[in-house]
Every structure is written in structure tokens, then in C-alpha cells.
Image (tube, coloured by chain):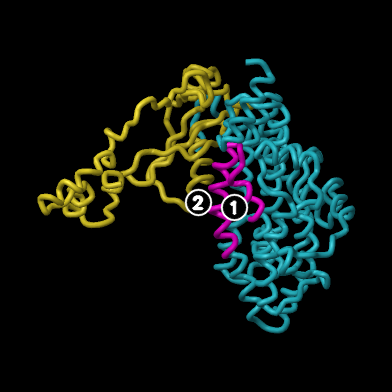
Chain colours: A yellow, B cyan
Amino acid sequence: MGSGGNDPFTPEGFGGCVKGGEGMSEGNVQEGFGVFEVFVQKTQADFHTHVGSVVAPSPDVALMNARENFLRRDLGVNLWVVPRQCVTATPYDSEGDWFAREFDRKYREAGGYPENGRLWKMYKEKVLQLEEIVEDLHGKGDKNNESASS
Amino acid sequence: MNREEKETRFIERIKAGMKIEATDWMPDTYRKLLLKLIHMHGISEIMGALPEKEWVPKAPTLKRKLAIMAKVQDEMGHGQLLLRVAEDLAEPFGRTREDLVADVIHGRVKFHNVFHMEAPTWADAGVIGWLVDGAAIINQAALLHTSYGPYARVLKRICAEESFHMQHGESIILALAGGTDAQRKMLQDSLNRWWESLLFFFGPMEVTESAQQMIDYGIRTKTNEELRQQFFSKYVPRIRSLGLTIPDPNLSYNETTKRWSWTLPDWEKFRKIVRDNQGPKSQERLNLRRFAHEEQAWVREAMIRSRLKGSVVV
């Protein structure tokens, strides 16, 4: 678990990360302790997912605290801990919405083409769905295909 | 935006069901109310592990021992998750985890009345899991819709683990309820011991000024009495189905008003327990907390020193 002699955690700046990125606070660093954001990878078919944060004096201890806090029941294959200062985030509430949707984006989605089904009926055929292809190839409920077929 | 516009915008966001985040602007009253609530919640989780911890060495079977250990660990874990949320709120006041943890030792933060009480028999371990956790779950589930995002997210994880605590408590009391006369009596005695504390746990009948403010800010959505009524509805029929007697002759359900009437506990007695740490176990448990915190101070310091020297802590 240890990161050997290359421990990136230094008291000066948590591995040289720029302090206080956009939308982030400085992060409640008590004397010698820091806040680490925790990411859990449930299986190797999944990406790491943010689950919360821990306070720790070093990345190694942050990893142990993260395991104790977030994996008492849930399974995981990998953990990341990231000093909070290293996260650059968008603001939640500001002038000019980062996530504004001026247009109807249905045309980007599978569900944006509901007429296909009706048209196929004229040819006595059905819409082809991705799920059907994945299922034919890998069977139902295959973990590796969950994201592909959802 | 000036202060007033910010405040108006803030209220609009809450009314629209939007969540507030740690990095958002928030009125001081909102921050202070939340901090007080979450600080007490977190510290109560940690103090709440202590009465149950007393039963780890005395649990009747290995399976029971493992299960109650898991529960004690969960309570400590919940305390850590909640203190993490509290810390971010306390940051503008220059207060850290160390301060929030030490506050309970110095009597600067209170913890729930139920954790000041004795747990003398194995039935108490069961009743704590069944009814004390049951009451806490109703409280926490009601808070799932709180306007503060970081609290809501942590509560989601806590509630998921509480569902294990519910089954754990029920498993213990069901075993006793189906046991010998002595075991059934043990269970009844325990219920008698806990009943008043359970009702006080939900807080006073009247909606205090700060409770109203918390409702206005969307921190809470239900009143104390609404939650207590739900507790009655969920638990009274189950308690009675086991043949147990609830130690309140005035407890009854009114079909027309759809409400339970009940005997008010001695509020002043319980207020004193919480305010002055004058419960039967308050001082003993606070001493244990102080001992644990102070005796391990050198470990916390050593971890920092070892990092500064570039060595690896594992």
C-alpha cells in the first residue's frame, strides 16, 4: 500500500497541487491533517466512483481510513484518495450556468427516435436494440455489459 | 449581489428543492443550525457505540459477538462521516476535527439522552438495536430530504447500514421473546427501562424557534411530534404482538384524529441528563471517551511526524 520514497504528500502543498481550485474551498486542513476525496472502483469493469471524503495525516492513512469507512460491506478492487486541493470543480450556483441546455438534445439519444418502431411495423420488423446484441453475445445480466446496455 | 439578494436567492433555491453545497454562500444562521445539528448527530454516533461496546465481551455466542462488533464499528464510522460534514461547515469558524471531537469531553456539545443510560442486560443490547435505533432511523430517514447536499449524501449511506441494525436488533429481541420466562421478563424489564427515554429522544412537543427555523430552511421537514407519532404507529403494534406491556397506561390511538395520545415524560429530568451530563452513565462514558482521545494523542502526532520525515506509515 505504501508509496515508497515517492510520497507526493508534502506539508507545503499536498503534492504541489494548486490550492483552492475554482469552486473548491481550501479544505479544512487541520494542523498536519488533510482532507482526501475517496474514489472506489467496485470491479474492474467499473470506473472509480466518488463516495465521500476522509481526514488523514498522509495518503497511506487516508487509504486505510477510506477502506474502514466505505468498504466495511461493499466490495472493491481499488481505491483512490486525492487531496482535496487537487480537485478542480465547476461552481454549483453562479452566473452563466455551466450545465445550461439551450436545445432539446433528444436527437443525441436512443429515445429520440420513437417513430422507428412504427415505421418498422410497415415492413413487419422491429427496432433493433443494443441490449439485444449484447445479450446474444454475452447472455443476460453480464456485469461487463451493464453500462453498455443500460 | 448584496447580502439581502443573496439570502433571497438562497431561499428560492431551497424552495425549488435544490441542494445547498459546502462551497455555496449560505446565511450564518443556516450554517450554525446545521453545524449544531450535525455536530451533535456525529458525536452521538460515537457516544452511542459505548453502551453497545459494553456487550461485545459478554455477547452470548460468537455470531452475536461478531454482529454487535460490526454494529459498534458502524456507529464509529457514522460518527466519522458526520464529523467530516461538520468540519467543512465549521471551517469559517476556524474549527477542526480535533476541536469537534474534544468539544464533547469539555461539555461543549451534547449527545442524545439515550446514550447516557445504562444497558445492564443482554435484552438492553437488543432493545437498543430494535427501538433506540428504530427511533434514530425514523429521525434520519426524515432528514434524507434535507436541503444540505453533503448531509443528505452521508445520510443515504448511514440509512443503508441502519437497515442491518434494524434486523440485528429484531433478531436479538425475537430470540428473547420466544425464550424462557426469565428471558421474556428480561425483555419486559428492558422495555420498561427504555420507554421514557425513547419518547424524550424525539424532543419536545412544541416547535421551538430553532426547530421552526430548521423547517423554514429545509434542514428538517418534519416536527418532533410527527416523527414520534410515526414511531408509535410502526412500533407499538409490534411491541404488543410479542405480548409485551408498554409502561404507559394512557397510550392509545384515536381512530378519528389518527393520532396517538401518550403520557409526557419528565422533561426536566431528561433535559438535565443531556444538558449537565447527569445521566446514570454520562460521566463513565465521557471518561472513557476522554481516555481514548488523550491516550491516543501520541499516535496522531507520530503519524504526522513520520510523514514529515518522509517515511511510510503502514
What is the secondary structure assignment of the residue under circle 2? loop
Discs 2, 1 touching: Cβ within 8 Å = yes
Q: Chain of mark 1?
A: B
Range drawn in magenta: B138-167
Q: Chain of mark 2?
A: A
Q: How many marks?
A: 2
Quadrant of the rendered image containing residue B97: top right
Percent x, y for residue B244?
A: 72, 76
Q: Looking at the magenta stretch, what is its main secondary structure? A: helix
Kind of residue at badge 1: Gln
Residue at 67% over, 49% down: B45
Kind of residue at badge 2: Arg
Q: Is residue B142 magenta?
A: yes
Q: Which residue is mark 2?
A: A72
Percent x, y for residue A23?
A: 52, 22
Q: Which residue is mark 1?
A: B73
